[in-house]
Image (cartoon, rainbow, N blue to C red):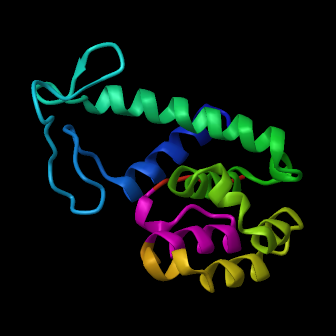
């Protein structure tokens, strides 16, 4: 399980990769979306059209989702709990982007990572379609898997130990 510092570092990494938008947008086009009639809302009447979500609210939700992914991976992925926080964060990043089932579809990659064969894991990830589609994001992930260090671009002053 990620401790509070590792949770914060993982959240910063995901924030870097995902970006922040206060109002709803189409993930494919990047354009803001609106409800066909009335106000776009979610949850318990959260008005996304006019108020959106603040950075504080988004970080709270993000950390909650990271915790849920951390628990799910700890429970369902043999060897995950023995990984250092950086490599756990890298897997969480992938699960956040692809979903748990999407991450688990990378069978060889997961076997390499959980077997501490980080060179083959990084190379396997670099040979995937998702790497070709989101090269910058997945290069950061593959480097973190390989080195056990957070990507330099994040300016996270932690060694990952």
* Residue 17, picture quadrant: bottom left
Can residue 1 be seen here? The reply is: no
Task: Determine whether 136 is above or below 57 in the image.
Answer: below
Vertical position of residue 105 compared to residue 55: above or below: below
Tell me if residue 125 comes above or below residue 51 in the rendering: below
61 left or right, relative to 127: left
Please report the residue visible at 14 percent of the width from the left and 48 percent of the height from the top: 32
Q: Quadrant of residue 69?
A: top right
**Dominant SS in magenta:** helix
Whether residue 158 is visible here, answered yes or no, is yes
Report the side of 56 relative to 67 (left or right): left
Q: Residue at x 82, y 44 (%)?
A: 76
Residue 145 lies in the magenta stretch: yes
State the image coordinates of residue 1 (x, y, percent, origin top left). 74, 36
Instruction: Give the residue furthest to the front.
Output: 37
What percent of the width, then of the height, locates residue 150?
A: 56, 61
The magenta segment: 137-155
Task: Please count the marks in the image.
Answer: 0
Residue at 62% x, 33% y is 67
Q: Look at 61% across and 73% down and name the residue there.
A: 142
- For residue 33, above or below residue 155: above
Q: Position of residue 137 (x, y in %)?
A: 46, 69
| Left or right: 52 in relation to 142 | left
């Amino acid at each position: 399980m990620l401790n509070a510092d590792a949770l914060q570092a993982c959240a910063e990494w995901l924030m870097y990769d995902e970006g922040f938008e206060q109002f709803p947008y189409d993930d494919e086009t990047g354009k803001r979306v609106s409800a066909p009639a009335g106000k776009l809302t979610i949850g318990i009447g959260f008005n996304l059209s006019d108020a959106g979500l603040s950075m504080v609210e988004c970080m709270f939700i993000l950390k909650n989702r990271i915790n849920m992914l951390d628990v799910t991976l700890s429970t369902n992925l043999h060897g995950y709990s023995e990984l250092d926080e950086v490599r756990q964060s890298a897997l969480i990043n992938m699960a956040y982007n692809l979903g748990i089932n999407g991450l688990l579809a990378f069978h060889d990659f997961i076997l390499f990572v959980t077997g501490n064969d980080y060179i083959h894991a990084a190379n396997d990830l670099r040979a995937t379609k998702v790497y070709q589609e989101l090269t910058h994001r997945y290069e950061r992930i593959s480097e973190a898997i390989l080195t056990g260090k957070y990507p330099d671009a994040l300016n996270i002053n932690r060694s990952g130990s």
